[in-house]
Image (spheres, rainbow, N blue to C red):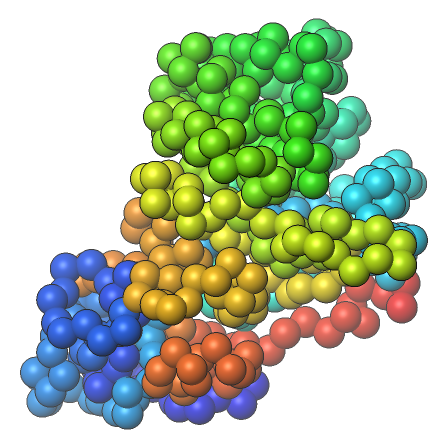
């Protein structure tokens, strides 16, 4: 077991007393809120949160673990990842850190190496990391160019079943929208996604055919009951406005499924009035937006010998203020699109606070890796602390925001159904056989 700051009672019924909770991730409990934090006793019985009570009001006969104001969060939701790409950096690195460099490196690696065994080994490694860090819900995009769509969705279905009691998994087909022009390919892709219970995705690019491509995508999604999750405007090009086109297509097609747009970087490059109109359309269309701050900071505005001039992220605050559902997520992990990361939502949250200025105040910031992504993914049972919910919790020694955001919280304790899990992370040497040292 890794070092932990506390050992909760190994009992079927116990209390986490004198805890500090992020109020944004708590449902059905009223208490004084200070900087978005509330104090509470959490009563756990047979793997379920039986009650959330004011401090000192838990039944005295129950075993207790006095947290001394330490934080307790729900397990995390990571709504935009790439488990199929993860950890290929040692085998095929990005030569210059640019977006074109990432595209080419992944293409070469996929065509040369992505067998079922290779994808499974790396995907399982990533899931073990995410689980140890305290994640209970993940959505992954899967590269779905033929024949990879058949290989990766089959592996994903196997992983979803194997991990169903630890991490709830969802998968999105990722492909260039122009590939829908190959009717046979697109029909087969739709069949694979339908058979494996996935979602439709895609990468939108500005082109004369964009509107017709979006209409085709939304018709296929409507006909098959798919939700849609797209990679959108991942560029610093001020002329990229596919987010606006997506919102118009949702409204035009009267699409009533859930639609998520990831990245949306170029929105921050538009003039104020253009951006305002697009944000209003996104809100009207009911599109959710997920920002990937670490990956976007890594790739965007990267030019040789030049310091980046902007942060690469979308207009997160403006979207949220307009009523758009917003969240942040990990995105890529040790692959050509992002050389670093470990699928740790605490790292994602800490970096998002800095990059997106989610602080001053931090009152609702915790929602971006808990309740908000869980709701966007259609799993409101995840990512929250509430009576009747599963006791899937993450305990931190930090008591206040400054403490939480100043250290990586490596001594955290993760409970799944009220039981402490082994938080040992897998050794990178386990991947040497597939990606090299």
Image quadrant in which the C terminus is located: bottom right
What residue is shown at x 42% (from left), y 50% (from top)?
A: 317
Q: In the figure, 194 relative to 381: above or below?
A: above
Image quadrant in which the N terminus is located: bottom right
What residue is shown at x 49% (from left), y 15% (from top)?
A: 249
64 to the left or right of 56 = right
What residue is shown at x 79% (from left), y 52% (from top)?
A: 302
* Residue 63 point in image, percent of width and height: 20, 89
Please tell me which residue lies in front, 280 or 382: 280
* Residue 187 point in image, percent of width and height: 65, 12
- Snapshot quadrant of residue 116: top right
118 to the left or right of 333 = right
Please tell me which residue lies in front, 218 or 352: 352
23 to the left or right of 362 = left
What residue is shown at x 69% (from left), y 25% (from top)?
A: 205
* Residue 73 point in image, percent of width and height: 35, 70
Is residue 125 visible in this depiction of the protein? Answer: yes
Q: In the figure, 298 relative to 2: above or below?
A: above
The mark tally for this picture is: 0
* Residue 107 point in image, percent of width and height: 85, 38
Is residue 227 visible in this depiction of the protein? Answer: no
């Amino acid at each position: 077991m890794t070092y932990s700051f506390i050992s909760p009672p190994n009992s079927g019924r116990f209390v986490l007393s004198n805890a500090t909770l992020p109020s944004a991730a708590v449902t059905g409990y009223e208490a004084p809120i200070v900087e978005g934090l509330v104090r509470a006793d959490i009563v756990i019985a047979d793997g379920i949160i039986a009650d959330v009570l004011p401090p000192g009001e838990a039944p005295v006969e129950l075993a207790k673990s006095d947290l001394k104001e330490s934080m307790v969060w729900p397990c995390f939701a990571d709504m935009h990842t790439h488990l199929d790409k993860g950890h290929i950096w040692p085998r095929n690195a990005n030569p210059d850190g640019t977006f074109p460099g990432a595209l080419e490196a992944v293409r070469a690696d996929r065509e040369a190496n992505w067998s079922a065994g290779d994808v499974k080994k790396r995907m399982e490694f990533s899931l073990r990391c995410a689980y140890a860090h305290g994640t209970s819900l993940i959505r992954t995009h899967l590269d779905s160019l033929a024949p990879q769509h058949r290989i990766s969705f089959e592996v994903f279905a196997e992983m979803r079943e194997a991990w169903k009691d630890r991490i709830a998994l969802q998968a999105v087909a990722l492909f260039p929208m122009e590939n829908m022009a190959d009717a046979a390919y697109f029909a087969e892709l739709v069949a694979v996604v339908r058979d494996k219970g996935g979602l439709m995705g895609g990468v939108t690019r500005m082109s004369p055919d964009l509107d017709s491509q979006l209409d085709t995508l939304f018709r296929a999604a409507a006909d098959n009951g798919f939700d849609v999750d797209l990679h959108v405007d991942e560029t610093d090009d001020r002329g990229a406005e596919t987010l606006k086109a997506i919102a118009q297509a949702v409204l035009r097609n009267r699409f009533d499924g859930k639609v998520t747009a990831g990245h949306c970087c170029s929105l921050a490059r538009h003039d104020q009035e253009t951006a305002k109109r697009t944000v209003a359309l996104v809100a009207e269309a009911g599109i959710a937006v997920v920002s990937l701050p670490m990956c976007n900071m890594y790739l965007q505005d990267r030019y040789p010998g030049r310091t980046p001039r902007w942060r690469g992220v979308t207009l997160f605050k403006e979207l949220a203020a307009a009523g758009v559902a917003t969240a942040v997520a990990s995105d890529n992990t040790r692959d050509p699109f992002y050389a670093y990361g470990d699928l740790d939502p605490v790292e994602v949250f800490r970096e998002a606070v800095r990059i997106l200025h989610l602080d001053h105040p931090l009152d609702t910031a915790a929602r971006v890796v808990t309740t908000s992504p869980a709701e966007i993914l259609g799993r409101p049972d995840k990512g929250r602390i509430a009576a009747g919910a599963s006791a899937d919790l993450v305990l931190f020694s930090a008591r206040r925001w400054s403490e939480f955001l100043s250290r990586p919280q490596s001594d955290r304790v993760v409970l799944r159904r009220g039981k402490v899990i082994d938080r040992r992370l897998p050794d990178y040497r386990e991947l040497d056989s597939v990606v090299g040292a």
